[in-house]
Image (cartoon, grey):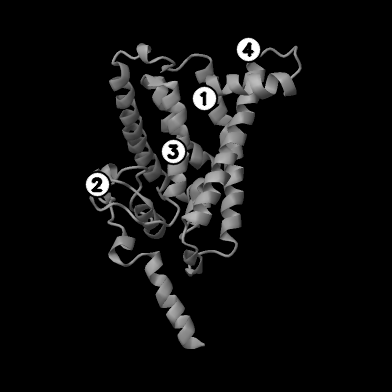
Amino acid sequence: MDHVLNIADSSIFTPHVYPASWSEEGALRQIVSLWLVTNLGAVLLFLGCGALNFYYVFDHKLMMHPLFLKNQVKQEIELSIISIFWMSFPTVAIFFWEVQGNSKLFDNISESSLGWPGVFLSIAGLLFFTDMCIYWIHRFLHHKSIYKHLHKQHHIFKIPTPFASHAFHPLDGFLQSLPYHIYPFIFPLHKAVYLSLFVFVNIWTISIHDGDYRIPGPLICLINGAAHHVDHHLFFNYNYGQYFTLWDRIGGSYRHPSALMGKGPHDHIPKLMAEAAHTQ
C-alpha cells in the first residue's frame, strides 16, 4: 500500500489537504491517509463494480423469486457500506504495518529468488492459500454457536444480488479477508501482485453473487462460481470455497450446482409466472 499512499500524498493530500508542517512520514498522518484511501477505494470499487454487474449481468427476473426480500438491494448496500467502514479499522492497522516495511512484499522482480517464475508461482500460491484458509474460516462461521452472531447477517439474502457481496457483519468480513492480508507476511510477494489481487478478490466476490450461473463445462467441477455459491445461500452447509471446489470436496461439503441441473432459482421463475397468470 506504500505506492498507493505515495500517489495519494503527491497528488491530493500534500498539495490540497494537509498542512505543510505535517510530514508525510508521520505515523498518524499515514494512518489517517490509509484509512481515507481504504474507505474511499473500497466503497467506489464495491458500488462501481456492483452497479455494473447489477445492471448488465444480474438477471432481474430473480427479484421475482419468493425468497427475494422486500427492499433487498437497499438492505444489501446499507449493510455493505457499514461493514466496509468498520472493517477498515483493523485493515488499516495491517496496511500500516506493511507500509512500515514489516512484510515480505518487494518492488523489483530481481528481488525474487526465482525471478518471473517466482512471481507467477506467488499468484497461484496466494489464490490457493486464501482459498484454503477462507474455506475453514467460512465453515467455522457456520458453527451453530457462532453463526447467529456473525454470519447470519449475510445469509438473510437467499437470492443475492452483486450488492450482497460485501453485506457482512464487519467481524465476519474481516475474518474472511484476513488470509489475504496474512499471506505477504509469510511469503514473498510483489507489491503490484498484492494490489492487483486485492482488486481481483473484491471483483470475484461480487461476481459469485451476480446470478450469472454460466460456467464453461470443463471448469464446473473446479471453479466455485455463482451457481455454486447461490446453493450455499440456499442450502447453507455446502460450497464454502472462495475460488475453487477443492476444499469442499476434501471437506465433504461439495454440492453440484442446482442451477446447472434445472433446479436453480431461475427455474422457479417461469413456474411462478405461470401460476400467477393462471390465478388471474
**Residue 182 locus on image (x, y percent):** 42, 26
Of callouts 3 and 2, the N-terminal one: 3
Asked whether, in this view, residue 127 is left or right of residue 72, the answer is left
Of callouts 4 and 2, the N-terminal one: 4
Is the C-beta separation of discs 4 and 2 under 8 Å? Answer: no
Report the amino acid beneath label 4: Glu
Asked whether, in this view, residue 162 is left or right of residue 32, the answer is left
Q: Residue at x 57, y 57 (%)?
A: 73
**Residue 69 location, quadrant:** bottom right
User: Tag 4's secondary structure?
Assistant: loop
CA separation, marks 1 and 3?
17 Å
Of callouts 1 and 3, the N-terminal one: 1
For the residues carrying marks 1 and 4, which lies nearer the camera in this image?
4
> Which residue is under mark 2?
249
> Which residue is under mark 3?
201
Asked whether, in this view, residue 113 is left or right of residue 273, the answer is left
Is the C-beta separation of discs 1 and 3 under 8 Å? Answer: no
> Which residue is under mark 1?
94
> Which residue is under mark 4?
25
User: Tag 2's secondary structure?
Assistant: helix
CA separation, marks 1 and 4?
17 Å
